[in-house]
Image (cartoon, helix red, strand yellow):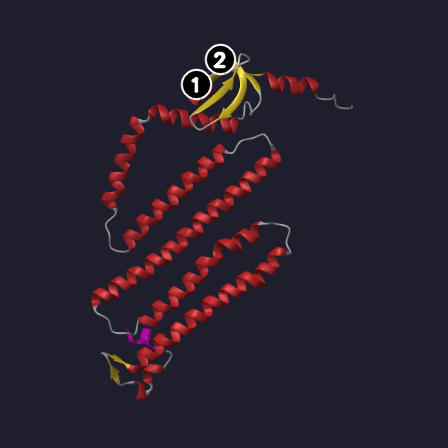
Amino acid sequence: METNEVDRIALGLNHVSWLQQDYLGNPLWSYVVFFLYVLAAVFLSKLADVLLTKHVRRLTEKTKSKLDDRLVDVFHGPLKVSVFVLLMHLGMKPLSKPPWMQEYLAHGFGIIVALALTYILLKLVDVSYELAKERVAIRDPRSQHQILILLRKAVKVFVIVTAVLVTADNNGIKVGGVIASLGLTGLAVALAAQETLSNLLGSIVILADRPFFLGDRVKIGVDEGIVEHIGIRSTRLRTTEGDVITLPNRTVAAANVRNFSKTTEQLTQPASKS
């Protein structure tokens, strides 16, 4: 470790003459510095906890929006862990350690911070999903949330895969071959699951365009019935005879849809006053 970096971390204790004595391969001042950083880690992580749970929470409770309350919950745990880990890492730097231990500790601290950041990103995805679901429900209470659920899962998978690859690359693991193999595997899966993917795209079209809702009486192609379920793979209709018809979403997205419920709503709406 460079001299300037040692001076910054050691808080000037490395220049105190009576702390220069060696003990178990390290000068006495390095143990004192480590002990001070441990105390600082405990104190500052507890301080961050108190500030978030009491002072910041009181401020967020005064606002009408629930977004700030959710953000406090998201950053609460990871902030404590990150502060504690960072100060512990700084406190251990002046201590002489075998190269393998130094390497493992550096990687370990980096992985812990990466886990904290990944946790924050995943929680932010959940918060975004809840906010989007509330807004969609306010705009149209009958709308379903499968497309939001699908997007949330896709974004979470992307965050996790990206975090793993970036963390591995920062820890000296070559990820170029892994990315290439993932690309080939994804291509093979896409070719093998063309029908499933087409149904998935069909469900996105249906949920985005919203030609019908649950409970609507519709005619899709030659099939007619009440919409019972709009899923990721298929849509289910119940006929007047009580039978259930399951239609692949790719078929529904490409078919002519006649919605009798919407026609009834338009006919029964009161005429606007001129």
Label 2: few (<14), some (14–19) or many (≥20) C-alpha neighbours in 10 Å: few
Q: Position of residue 33 (x, y in %)?
A: 35, 77
Q: Position of residue 36 (x, y in %)?
A: 39, 76
Number of marks in picture: 2
Determine the residue located farthest toward the right in the rendered image. Answer: 274
Where is mark 2, residue-wise?
221
Determine the residue located farthest toward the front in the rendered image. Answer: 242
Label 1: few (<14), some (14–19) or many (≥20) C-alpha neighbours in 10 Å: some
Label 1 to label 2, Cα distance in Å?
A: 9 Å
Location of residue 152 with respect to 232 vertically, above or below: below
> Does the magenta segment cover residue 192?
no
Mark 1 / mark 2, whichever is N-terminal: 2
**For this rendering, which residue is in front, 111 or 238?**
238
Q: Could you tell me the amino acid type at mark 2?
A: Gly
Q: Which secondary structure lies at badge 2?
A: loop
Region rendered in magenta: 1-7
Where is mark 1, residue-wise?
251
**For this rendering, which residue is in front, 94 or 4?**
94
Q: Residue at x 36, y 76 (%)?
A: 35
Q: Main secondary structure of the magenta part?
A: helix
Q: Which residue is drawn at 33% across and 25% down?
A: 194
Q: Could you tell me the amino acid type at mark 1?
A: Thr
Determine the residue located farthest toward the bottom in the rendered image. Answer: 18
Q: Which secondary structure lies at badge 1?
A: helix
Q: Residue at x 43, y 70 (%)?
A: 42
Marks 1,2: beta carbons within 8 A: yes
